[in-house]
Image: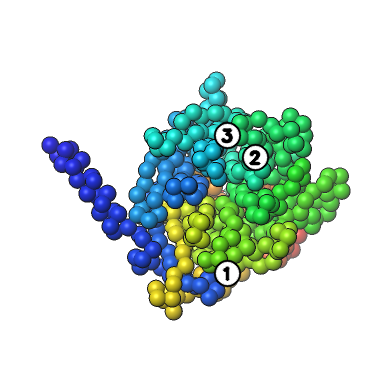
Amino acid sequence: MRFIRIVALLPLAGLFIHCNSSKLSNPPEQQFRIGASTVGIQSVATHLNVPWQIAWGPDQQIWYTEQSGNISKVNPENGKTKRLLTVPDVFRDRTSGLLGMTLHPDMKAHPYVFINYTGYSKEKNKVSKVVRYTYNELKDTLLNPVVFLEYPAWSSHFGSRIVIAPDGMVMISTGDGAQDGNAQNIKSPNGKVLRYNLEGKIPVDNPVKGNAVWAWGLRNPQGLVYANGKLYCSDHGDATDDEVNLIRKGANYGWPFIEGFVDTEKEKPFAKDAIVIAPLRSWTPTIAPAGMAYYSSDKIPELKGSLLLTTLKGNSLHSLTLNTTGTGITKELNYFEKTFGRLRSVCVSPAGDVYVATSNRDWNPNAAPAKNDDRIIRIYRLDAKHANPTAKSAVIVHKSTAVLNKGALLYTNYCASCHKEDGKGIENAFPALLKSPVVAGDKNQLMHTVLNGKNAMPKFSFIEDNDLAVLLSYVRKQFGPGADAVSAADIKSAKK
Ligand code: HEC
């Protein structure tokens, strides 16, 4: 009886959602200034579980993947969501699961949706997969999976994004699986940009005959986008040098021999032997760059002609303005820093609204996620009538950073993404520094760990001696109370 009543109410509930929709005319949750434009912020979907990819669909809805294996869509006008498919064999742990997705730009002619995820082979081995589904409009679901590629899953650095090139080919960025040999091995699909046709065959004009590899030397590329016919890719560095690259046919991006630009003695010999393309931009301290989109609309003129890049560690949305040839970045601005938390994916609607997806429920959160995380958020221009003239700039200067002492700042930049601001780490992934005997004990052991790295901990020998001394003194004071300071002379002798 009760069940029947709920069912009877459902159409009404739908109506209710529709009438009280997050329509553009409704007041935004927040307002910010981007240059002379005022933008509103609205949550169009909430309570998601790590939306990994958002993509604008031909039905004016946002299609999205969740890392756990769901493909859904949300109507941004009324917040109504619809599950299209639960991919049956998704294996999710920290960074694996259902990741990148793209919709064919001409779904009428080619009703294809491409996804990359970690699942199982026929033999029940764990593998990463690139799969094409066909969208059935009548049933409003995805059917007929065709596996383009199965490749080793490893245990981290999964990438991955998929885009359709202007020539109709399928471009896929893959992670190196945290195996240093992969990215430079032309026979491995890991650490690459791959290229297939719509049927999953290798095009005859790929750089190496019979090989899907289009470009190589990548580490963990989580952003891929075309702008004016050129392909751009974001890539996670290790302890340093996150990158945005312009991807060229047959080019090598250097990982693991070259990080960022060729700027150390160690990198020079490899650069001499191999044709390595420098990034357009690299970031140290790292920002954990993820999804990318291109903004070509006139709606928010300040963003026009720029690559939009979401960051996880950076908790922000960068706009990277391209030069007229698309071969360089002329201006960079960093928006919404620490406003929505970690940002994984971005897309732009034909009307020029920007949508971002948060990633605050993933394996490596900043802090406890907000109740309504994860969200898909609309950033849209307000007309003069609705704009608050006192809205604050979306380029946010955090006062607390300015007054932090240098040690705390270095810790935030280089260590907190894993060990966390409070030094408590993440269980089973990053050990707590708080009360760690390595931190508070013999400083040689601490310096050795930080200079040389250990397993998933990168080495930090690139940090200048004085800075590292300040950083480690801060760590010892903060997390190992009572431990004495580390001097630059200590670091110098530990390096010997
Ligand atoms: C990319 C993540 C990452 C970053 C960034 C990172 N660490 Fe670590 N750290 C780890 C991991 C993983 C371990 C555990 C290594 C092992 O024992 O296998 C570790 C271990 C340690 C330990 C040993 C703790 C113990 O009790 O065993 C210390 C000390 C430490 N890190 C300090 C630092 C400092 C200082 C920084 C910044 C300069 C830093 N780490 C940056 C991942 C990271």
Q: CA distance from mark 3 to mark 2?
A: 14 Å
User: For mark 2, what is the residue?
Assistant: 169
**The disc labelled 3 sits on which kind of residue?**
Val
Say which label, 3 or 1, has the lower sequence index.
3
Work out whether 128 lies above or below 51. above
Decide if residue 362 is in sight here.
no
Residue farthest toward the bottom in the current orientation of the protein: 389
Q: Place residue 179 in its image quadrant.
A: top right
Indicate the secondary structure of the residue bearing disc 1.
helix
Compare residues 228 and 50 and report the one nearer the observer. 228
**SS for callout 2:** loop
How far is disc 1 from disc 2 in space, using C-alphas? Answer: 31 Å
Crowd class of label 2 (few under 14; some 14 to 19; many from 20; radius 10 Å)? some
Amino acid type assigned to the residue bearing label 2 in the image: Met
Residue pushed farthest top? 123
Mark 3 Cα within 10 Å, few/some/many (few <14, many 20+)?
Answer: many
x and y percentages locating residue 10 in the rendered image: 23, 45
Q: From the viewer's side, name the closer residue of 147 and 446.
A: 147
Task: Look at mark 1 in the image and give the residue it sits on.
Answer: 302
Q: Is residue 339 visible?
A: yes
Q: Are marks 3 and 1 in contact (CB under 8 Å)?
A: no
Q: Residue lying farthest left?
A: 1
Camera-nearest label, 1 or 2: 2
Taking the spot 39% from the left edge, 63% from the top edge, the residue there is 24
Residue 253, image x, y percentages? 74, 47
Q: Amino acid at mark 1?
A: Glu
Residue at numbered disc 3: 130
| Residue drawn at 51 percent across, 61 percent down | 352
Q: Residue 155 appears at what percent x and percent y?
A: 58, 36
Mark on residue 369? none
Mark 1 or mark 2: which comes first in sequence? 2
Residue drawn 49% across and 50% down?
56
